[in-house]
Amino acid sequence: MLSIFKSIPTHMVIGFIYGLIVEQFGWTVYIVLGGFAISCLLTLPPWPMYRRHPLTWQPAVPESQGDVRDKPQENVKKPRKHK
């Protein structure tokens, strides 16, 4: 039952509780938007601390090989029409 609360971000909980205490919905919105702005500021820019150990990605697959799912199947039997 408490696993539902693990998916709610902390800044939303703090904003809701503070807005409930002061009985102002506007403060709830301000705190939630402030938490969103802080989380965006910390995660979106390419900070040097995140770029020290970059991930090694798999090499790209050449387009000449293509994907089997993209091509139409030639050996599929067509349904027979009844007369």
Image (cartoon, rainbow, N blue to C red):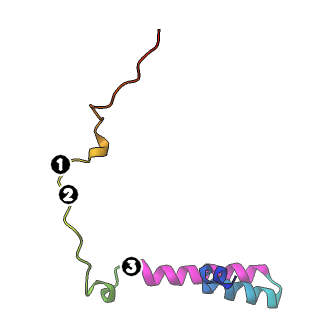
Q: Give the CA separation, mark 2 to mark 1.
A: 8 Å
Relative placement, left or right, of 32 versus 75 is: right
Q: Considering the numbered disc 3 on the image, is that residue within a helix, a strand or a loop?
A: loop
* CB-based contact (under 8 Å), mark 2 and mark 1: yes
SS category of the residue bearing label 2: loop
> Depth-wise, is mark 2 or mark 3 nearer the camera?
2
Of 55 and 37, nearer the camera is: 55
Which residue position holds label 2?
Answer: 61
- Alpha-carbon span between mark 3 and mark 1: 36 Å
Picture residue at 83% right of the left edge, 85% below the top: 23
Q: Amino acid at mark 3?
A: Pro
Q: Amino acid at mark 1?
A: Gln
Quarter of the image where one finds residue 13: bottom right
Q: Which mark is residue 45?
A: 3
| View extreme (top): residue | 83
- In the image, the segment drawn in magenta is 25-45
Is residue 56 positioned above or below 63 on the image? Answer: below
- Residue that mark 1 sits on: 65
Mark 1 secondary-structure assignment: loop
Q: Position of residue 41 (x, y in %)?
A: 47, 82
Residue 78 found in image quarter: top left
| Distance from the alpha carbon under mark 2 to that under mark 3 | 29 Å
Q: Residue 25, which numbered label?
A: none
- The rendered magenta stretch, by its main secondary structure, is classed as helix
Q: Nearer the viewer, residue 51 or 59?
A: 59
Of tags 3 and 1, the one toward the viewer is 1
Magenta-drawn stretch contains 40:
yes
